[in-house]
Image (spheres, helix red, strand yellow):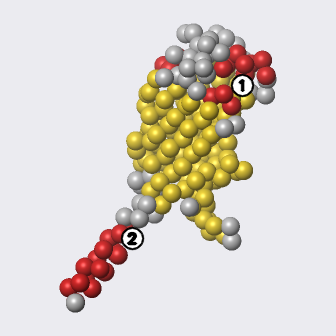
Amino acid sequence: MKKLNMIALLLIVTGSAFAQTTWGVDKAHAKLGFGITHMMLAEVDGSFKVYDASITTTKDDFSDAVFDVSADIESINTDNEGRDKDLKSEKYFDVAKFAKLTYKSTSFKKVDGNKYKLTGDLTLHGITKPVELDVVLAGPVTNPRGTKIGIKATGTFKRTDFGIGGPGGAMLSEEVTLIANGEFAKK
């Protein structure tokens, strides 16, 4: 009986040590956006209205965190209907063939304090490439509505690496800035 109790205790302790925590994006307090320079003059911002994001981890320090992000390209919004239509066309995103953007992390490493380097595979326009992001993690904070963390992720990638638009940067810069801000609630 003593041996059985010890095995049960070991299973409980081991099971709780490896318990997975999932954090879901709070869309009322989040945005998945981007910026690109137009005609080497001004930054044009946009966002995706339909997206999802989650973080899973088994460690309180988030050192093993896995980020999953997806967005419907059809929901792109730059506050200009004509530009949005152009971006959805074969000339750029070609949403008829490539409807989704995905990002799945491969590593999440602490740099200093609440700053991290997030590396993952971005799939866009049918092409998958590694993209590194700088992340600031705030929290966790617990209040009557639950436990939340804040994430701000920024980084850049070359649109032509993903076959989006033509080469050269006179009309549109090759470099696109990704900006993701949001609160994530512990599930």
Is there CB contact under 8 Å for labels 2 and 1? no
Q: Amino acid at mark 2?
A: Ser
* Marks 2, 1: nearer the viewer: 2
Badge number at residue 59: none
Instruction: Please determine whether, in this image, residue 60 is positioned above or below residue 105.
Output: below
Where the C terminus falls, by quadrant?
A: bottom right
- x, y percent for residue 18: 37, 64
Query: In this figure, which residue is indicated by the disc labeled 2?
Result: 16
Q: Residue at x 46, y 23 (%)?
A: 127
Q: Nearer the viewer, residue 14 or 97?
A: 97
Circle 1 — which element?
strand
Query: In this figure, which residue is indicated by the disc labeled 1?
Result: 44
Q: Residue at x 60, y 20 (%)?
A: 96
- x, y percent for residue 94: 60, 18
Q: Label 2 to label 1, Cα distance in Å?
A: 47 Å
Circle 2 — which element?
helix
- x, y percent for residue 108: 43, 47
Q: Earlier in the sequence, mark 2 or mark 1?
A: 2
Q: Residue at x 43, y 31 (%)?
A: 130
Instruction: Please determine whether, in this image, residue 119 is positioned above or below residue 2.
Output: above
For residue 70, which quarter of the picture? top right
Q: Residue at x 67, y 11 (%)?
A: 171
For residue 138, which quarter of the picture? bottom right
Is 63 displayed left or right of 42 in the figure? Answer: left
Q: Amino acid at mark 1?
A: Val
